[in-house]
Image (cartoon, rainbow, N blue to C red):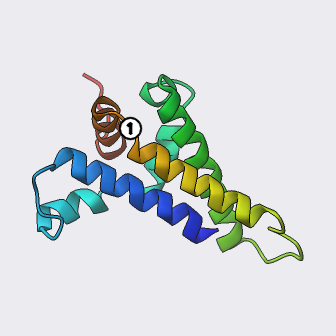
Amino acid sequence: MSTAYYAVFHSLAKSCASTLLPSTDTDSEAYERVYRALDHGPLKGAFAAKEGLLKRGESLRKIGDLVVRLQSERHRADYLPPRRGMFRGDAQDLVDQARQAVSEIERLSDEDRIALATLLLFKSRSP
């Protein structure tokens, strides 16, 4: 469960860093700072919001729904006591959903990538 979620998380981190620093070496300190700026709590919050930028586009909505589900399942797997058959039948489905989310992230338009990166990495402030 964790691996499925983290595959998507790292895909999002890469997308954000590559979008905001397109000509920067991926081994640079700047690239690493942007890559590591993605945080799990705000990530779920951004995708779980009932309104906002992520609910407007079909691709972003699809990615968001998958991220929220995968993160919830990761929490269940990592923090709840194991139960017999807890993920029987679900594991392959979740891996397939993670693959789908990564594919969706890779197919985003430049406009959606910019919107996603800025929303996920920068805190909104009231005027």
Residue plotted at (31% across, 46% down): 121
Q: Could you tell me which residue is drawn at 73 percent across and 66 percent down?
A: 91
Q: Residues within 10 Å of mark 1 (few under 14, many from 20)?
A: some
Nearest the camera: 96 or 72?
A: 96
Would residue 48 be visible to someone looking at this image? no
Q: Which residue is mark 1?
A: 108
* Residue 56 drawn at (x, y percent): 48, 22
* Image side of residue 72 versus residue 9, left or right: right
Q: Is residue 108 above or below residue 56?
A: below
Give the structural element (helix, strand or loop) at label 1.
loop
Tell me where residue 122 sits by quadrant.
Answer: top left
Q: Nearer the viewer, residue 3 or 119?
A: 3
Does residue 37 appear to the left or right of 23 in the view shown?
right
Residue 88 at x, y = what percent?
A: 84, 69
The residue located at (12%, 63%) in the rendering is 25
What amino acid is at disc 1?
Leu
Q: Position of residue 79 (x, y in %)?
A: 68, 72
* Figure quadrant of residue 117: top left
Q: Could you tell me which residue is drawn at 18 percent across and 65 percent down?
A: 26
In the image, is 57 to the left or to the right of 71?
left
Placement of the N terminus among the 4 image quadrants: bottom right
